[in-house]
Amino acid sequence: MKTNLFLLLFIASICLSAQNHKQGRVSVEELKKTASTIDPDAAAEVLYEKAYFVLRLGSDGRFELMKEYEGRIKIYDKDNVDESFLQQQVSLYSPNSSARERLHNFKGATYNLENGKAVPSRVRNADIFKERRNKYWESEKFTFPNVQNGSVLEYSYSITSPHYRDIGRWYFQQEIPVVSSEFNFRHPEFFIFNIDLRGEPIGKTKTNSYLEPNTTYNYVTNNHTFTNVPALKDEPYVFNANNLKASVRYELTMFSYPGFISENYATSWEQIAKDMMKSDGFGGALKGNRFLDETVNGLVEGTASPINKMEKIFQYVKNNYAWNNIYGTTTDQGIRSAFNDKSGNIADLNLMLVSMLSKAGLDAAPVALSTVGNLMINYSFPSRTSLNAVIASVVIDGKLYLMDATEKYSNINMLPMRDLNHRGFRISENGVQEISLSNSSLSTAKEVAMIYLAADGTISGNHSETRDAYFAMNDKMRQTDDPKKFEKRYLSNFNFDVEDFKINENKEKGMFRYVTKFENVQGAEIIGDKMILNPLLFSQLKKTTLNSTKRNYPMEFGSVISIEKIFKIKIPEGYAVESLPEEKTFLLEGNLAGYAYKVIEKEGEILVNTLYQIGSSSLPSSYYSAMQEFEKNQFNTESQAVVLKKI
């Protein structure tokens, strides 16, 4: 009786929730709303979003996951809303017909207030676009029509999936405020899931069990409800902001049906590593491979140094094989096919690299990791499905060397950003070792400007910036993705229009040089007989960025870095220096960061030199307040002005 009572109450609560936000019934009150009560300055907010997942027995006698989604978004200032909120895109895992996910009832509409009524502009089937992204994934998406200030956007869809070991992650927090976010998951009690709940504890979680009608077993119901969730603040030195969001993820860890079968899926990282070494696509892929012998012998012939052997093999694989942009911890087509086809997924190429390094007599092993886009690993939550990539490692004289052959601009101990997700697992026949994923090599950027200051306060001249290592690698990736967007972003650093923007690439050295020119742009302010200008002009730190009261996430820089600026400003005839900025030098505790600033006058020129250095690719959150003070000192230092006086 108690079970039936709970079931009735549960169904009633679901129905009540549905009545509060019934699809297709956007209220006039919602359309009249002029500002978010969570953040009055928000350009948009999520009025509600809901996911309802059920693991059930399908018509074919197999369990399947039914996922239903719906939501509603209010637009206050459409010109300042991120494009992602003005469209809906659903990714579907579809490697083949038997294992593919299927999308149902993909719907959307824009509601506007017309003559006191809510009038919809519905998305037509012809406006839904399908795209095959690669051999494993496809997507369907649409853009909401007729969006105006005050519009309410509504969507709903469902997915049937044969995959339920990892049901995906639900985010309660977004880049805009969220009034209500609800995630429900029902499953038979003999499927046992671990719950990975992250972010600030600003929601409520309820778990109940009841007898499912027409079955002989209980169902477990999990409900997570978050209300009045503030927008995620924009934080610098964060590779993936999703790591900061409140979210939940369920992963199957055990199937246990009394009298039938019991199976553990994730017991420990050690067991996961052993299982991976036994699998054909990981440990098995490293065995044999005699077809690589001739190539390896030719590469290392006459080379005695282990480091030189490692360098030659890494450069060979990196420069002769292409990554197909598919991730995975197991080979897709196999090392032999990747070797012959000159391409493969991330495991194909890096496991081939490990095999070649081992054949050269080096202590090589693969490193399994979760990429930045795949979120940080919860190390207290052993999970093979949280790992989605493989890189290579070698130990020489006790020192660990890391490399990823899928990125042309990468180097040994200079990994692409996607790999820098703090920690990974070095896996071999000897066991598993947790390692730090970081770049220890130095990355430099150097700005040089030759500037002529005119008597009317305008400036003309040229500016160049040279970037190498990690900086150049990131630039190359962004240029490849969207050249126009990269150029627009780079030129936004200047507060005026520039001329003759050029990009010079030195592939051999892995370096970029950017060159710009400018003429007759305002650079100084004239007050009476004095001319006042900031000697760093367009390159000064214009505002502080570390403005949160606290931070529980590391500061990610990507590399040990050094940024130098050298500006030469020709003093106009008829003017002389009255005062110069004060020289400044300061260090972060432990010498993990340093800054130097110096401005002098020499032979009719103002010479400016600054040096900014970070001594680690990431800093723990305990350094946040110290870095806040460091940045504040830099801002105040670079806000100083040069004063010239007419003579």
Image (spheres, grey):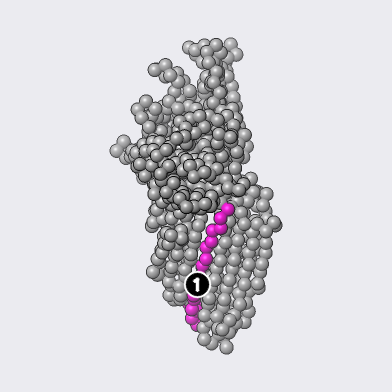
66 on left or right of 393 = left
The quarter of the picture where residue 222 lies is top right
Give the residue drawn at x 52%, y 23%: 186
Give the residue drawn at x 51%, y 55%: 470
Q: How far across and how far down the image is residue 195, in percent?
A: 58, 30
119 on left or right of 224 = left
Does residue 106 show up magenta in the picture? no
Does residue 454 show up magenta in the picture? yes
Tally the marks: 1
Considering only vertical position in the picture, is 597 above or below 130?
Answer: below
Q: Amino acid at mark 1?
A: Ala
Considering only vertical position in the picture, is 296 above or below 494?
Answer: above
| Most common SS among magenta residues | strand
Q: Secondary structure at mark 1?
A: strand
Q: How far across and how far down the image is residue 335, in percent?
A: 41, 38
Give the residue drawn at x 45%, y 56%: 475
Give the residue drawn at x 62%, y 82%: 578
Q: 213 or 13, which is in the foreground?
A: 213
Q: How far across and how far down the image is residue 203, in percent?
A: 60, 35
Residue that numbered label 1 is attached to:
449
What is the magenta range? 440-458
Considering only vertical position in the picture, is 510 above or below 321?
Answer: below
